[in-house]
Amino acid sequence: MPTKTPAADLEAEMRKISALVSLVAILLMATGFVDVLFSHQATVLPGASALPLSDMLSLKAMKASWGLWTMSVGIFMLALLPMLRVLLSFWFFFRDKDWLDMGVSFVVFLELLSSLHVGG
């Protein structure tokens, strides 16, 4: 019987997380799209773009356009998947005391974090 490697453990866990996050994100985006479509907010193409993170955190923006807010949250969730993968890698390498790969994961996480452009 083959033994499981840390990479196989990582892939198995990431597959579960990706499936869950993707399902929730797609449901949010579909719900928001239906709301925007039936509220006649999208009368011309291209319509409104996704909201920036600062607006997504605002209760005022959520009340103003619930459909666009919901779609934006779904898009944001999908954008977080690479960061979740790096964090999960960091945890697995930490657990296995693989200090070199843990350090590389941490540097990649810091780079992803610094590349975020919040607020427009």
Image (cartoon, rainbow, N blue to C red):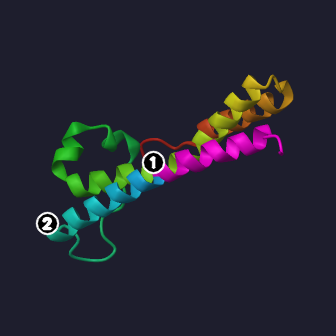
Q: Is residue 7 above or below residue 87?
A: below
In this rendered view, identify the residue nearer to me: 100 or 52.
Answer: 100
The residue indicated by pointer 1 is 77
The residue indicated by pointer 2 is 39
Whether residue 51 can be seen here: no
Q: Is residue 107 above or below residue 78?
A: above
Q: Quadrant of residue 2?
A: top right
Q: Residues within 10 Å of mark 2 (few under 14, many from 20)?
A: few
Q: Amino acid at mark 2?
A: Ser
N-terminal label among 2 and 1: 2
Which residues make up the magenta segment? Answer: 1-21
In this rendered view, identify the residue nearer to me: 103 or 60.
Answer: 103
Q: Residues within 10 Å of mark 1 (few under 14, many from 20)?
A: some
Verify whether residue 79 appears in magenta: no
80 lies left or right of 4:
left
- Please name the residue shown 36% across and 49% down the image: 73
Q: Is residue 85 above or below residue 40?
A: above
Q: Quarter of the image containing the N terminus? A: top right
